[in-house]
Image (cartoon, rainbow, N blue to C red):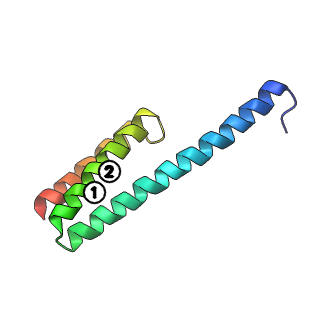
Amino acid sequence: MPNTPAAKKALRQNKKRKKRNKKTKKEVKALIKDTKSLIAEKKIEQAKEIFRKLQAKLDKAASKKVLRKGKVSRQKSQLAKNLGKA
């Protein structure tokens, strides 16, 4: 339990950030899942549309340091490769 006012504020900030980061990660996972399922169903145009949204979301998450830059790069690369094959 934090004792000083600064520590209490830091705890509040951490809780807010955790909530925001969790929301972002959840949205990214949902978009990845949607993209993969559309690729599997051979709905390429819809998959490309969602992939564009996903790229923007991933880049923003990486810039805010919610996700690591390398992981974001790898995910985009793999999905783009799968889109190209389909």
Where's the C terminus, which quadrant?
A: bottom left
Residue 75 appears in view: no
**Residue at coordinates 78% horizontally, 25% vertically from top-left?**
6
**Residue at coordinates 25% horizontally, 68% vertically from top-left?**
38
The three-letter amino acid code for the residue at tag 2 is Leu
Residue 29 appears in view: yes
Which residue matches tag 2?
A: 54
Instruction: Tell me if 64 is positioned left or right of 13 in this view.
Output: left
Instruction: Tell me if 46 is positioned left or right of 30 in this view.
Output: left
- Please tell me how crowded label 1 is: few (under 14), some (14-19), or many (20+) other residues with Cα within 10 Å: some
| Residue 81 image-quadrant placement | bottom left
Instruction: Tell me if 85 is positioned left or right of 16 in this view.
Output: left
The three-letter amino acid code for the residue at tag 1 is Ile
Q: CA distance from mark 2 to mark 1?
A: 6 Å
Give the vertical position of 29 relative to 77 (above or below).
Answer: below
Where's the N terminus, which quadrant?
A: top right
Farthest residue, direction right:
3
**Residue at coordinates 73% horizontally, 37% vertically from top-left?**
12
Residue 64's spot in the image, x, y percent? 46, 34
Q: Tell me the number on the disc at residue 27.
A: none
Farthest residue, direction left:
85
Q: Of helix, strand and loop, which one carries label 2?
A: helix
| Residue 56 image-quadrant placement | top left
Question: Do tag 2 and tag 1 residues touch (Cβ < 8 Å)?
Answer: yes
Q: Of helix, strand and loop, which one carries label 1?
A: helix
Which residue matches tag 1?
A: 50
Residue 24's spot in the image, x, y percent? 48, 49
Residue 21's spot in the image, x, y percent? 54, 45
- Please tell me how crowded label 2 is: few (under 14), some (14-19), or many (20+) other residues with Cα within 10 Å: many
Residue 54's spot in the image, x, y percent? 32, 51
Give the vertical position of 16 relative to 78 (above or below).
Answer: above
Give the vertical position of 60 relative to 29 (above or below).
Answer: above
